[in-house]
Amino acid sequence: MTTGTIRLGGVRQNNLRDISLELRKKSLIVVVGVSGSGKSSLVFDTIAAEAQRQINATFSAYAQNYLPSYGRPDADNIENLSAAIVIDQRRLHGGPRSTVATITDIGDGLRLLYARGATPSIGHANAFSFNDPAGMCLRCHGLGVEKILDVDAFIDTSASLREGPFAHPDYRPGTLTWRRYADSGLFDVDVPLEQYSMREMHLLLEAAAGEVEPTGAHDLPGDYEGVLVRFHRIQLAKDPTTLKGEAKKAYERLVTLGPCTECDGTRLNEAARSAGIEGLTLPQAYAMQVGDLAGQLRGWDLGPLDALLDDVVTQLERLTSLGLGYLSLDRATATLSGGEAQRVKMVRHLGSTLNDMLYVFDEPTVGLHTRDVHRLAQMLQVLRDKGNTVVVVEHDRQVMEIADQVVEIGPGAGVHGGELIFQGSFEDLRRADTPTGSALRSQAARPREPREPTGFVRIENAASHNLKDVTVEIPLGVLTVVTGIAGSGSRASSTGTCRSPPRTPSSSTRHRSTAHAAPPPRPGPGCSMRSAASSPSAPVNPRRCSPRTPTAAAGRVRAPA
């Protein structure tokens, strides 16, 4: 029996209608069809799920408790599967220590390069790691951020100790913490803080533990320490997610996150921040855009380290080829969109030496500019040419054109789909009587006369994210398309909010609306802007969320006539 094909028989998963097919291994297979036709049911819920279920079954029962659980797909038989790697559009949530550098392993190569070639030499590669005590900034523990207390909001210097100058429930008059200062005998509790001497203010706010001995008759046991010292030691050390009630509200009002004042957000200690190659330190390399960094490293001549340097440059160029050259290596993975996360994961696997694997992709061209689609297609071919089977769910014509085989599921969506209606080459698909074949043969839409706008929203000097003093007029009452290569700023310019009323075409009044990175202001009169971005707006309970929930359809059904 040949093992060169993946055999599927009697697949009835979800809306699939007892379909059977064979897929040639070590080839590039594109699965197409209208939305809801059953493509994902075949590729993800059947092929990928069964491959991952069988892999998980090889682990001990104890280990399986920590692995994702996959049910057996509804199918008569599934044969000759390879180990599957699913590269989907789920956003990366690697925690506060996960960055583009760590998730792609480019950071490992750079750390090794700097450990061997940087001057001054500071030791092994872990000395350049913000996840290792040898390299991390000890103030922020390698996180690059620290909690900052708004002292002005916390302390009302016009109030006395007796009146309660501290805006936190744990420091109110009568509490144990308040008594440490009011009963210490060091201060006049009836004098406003603004009238304290510099010495008294130092003792009240900044005295280190044990620096001074209380003299009051009712002072509490234990070392005395200043209010700010105590707040930093106790309150800032708490996990804000565990706080409740007034303590939580006070924390949110008084405490913010900001760049670490010791490492300036680079996460590394002084030694790692100072060592460099060709005048470039590792934090500076991390902060550069990937495309610019690749260009700079490509010009280096490091002699015996050139092989290692070439590996790093190759990985950087792969990111650039996939339209991610605008990212920086210090970008937190949690801030990447679904499409960006998918392509970042793809770069990681392109560097793998494994073969005879099954790679599954979910519409990898989402978010890509037309200019970059052919580069992604080339990457898919590279994965295939390494001896792997690549299965792609996709709608883009350029990806279909490079497929060794195209499979179409349809003809319609839901109960009207689930059938295997085509399997063959792209050229055969263009001649096929299927929804995708018909769409490929259809002519471009006839030119039409565009609608006239009913007004304009003028945005001036927009500087959100990477926008550079952009001024633009957005027409109202018409469909407007904002385009640009990935990372150009097209999303930043279109998903903001206006604060000024629209003007009519005949109006000469110019209304100013400046974009900021801060939370957007409320829309101005006559201006209502809503975002339908692809990224999730808020976490939902998957057990209670269905299509009727976000669309509010259930509310209309339940409403009385």
Image (cartoon, rainbow, N blue to C red):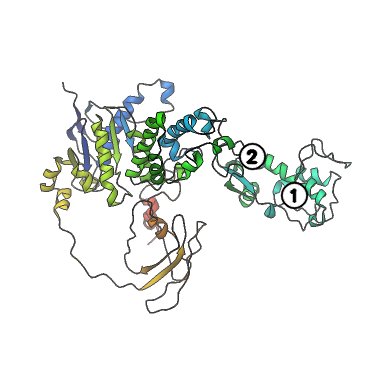
Residue 364, how many percent across, how many down?
Answer: 30, 43
Residue 5, how many percent across, how many down?
Answer: 18, 28
- Position above or below: 528 against 340: below
Q: What residue do we see at 76% from left, 40% from top? A: 208
Q: What residue do we see at 55% from left, 35% from top? A: 272
Q: Nearer the viewer, mark 2 or mark 1?
A: 2
User: How many labels, in total?
Assistant: 2
| Residue 342 appears in the picture as rendered | no
| Residue 325 appears in the picture as rendered | yes
Residue 191, how many percent across, how many down?
Answer: 84, 55
Mark 2 and mark 1: Cα distance apart in space: 20 Å
Hey, what amino acid is under mark 2?
Ala
Decide which of 106, 14 is in the foreground and name it.
Answer: 106
Quadrant that contains the C terminus:
bottom left
Label 2 crowd (10 A; few <14 / some 14-19 / many >=20): few
Quarter assignment of residue 19: top left
Quarter assignment of residue 299: top left
Residue 123, how many percent across, how many down?
Answer: 53, 28
Circle 1 — which element?
Answer: loop
Hey, what amino acid is under mark 1?
Arg
Quadrant that contains the N terminus:
top left
Residue under circle 1? 172
Label 1 crowd (10 A; few <14 / some 14-19 / many >=20): some
Q: What residue do we see at 51% from left, 29% from top? A: 126
Residue under circle 2? 237
Which numbered disc flags the more N-terminal residue, 2 or 1?
Answer: 1
- Position above or below: 155 against 112: below
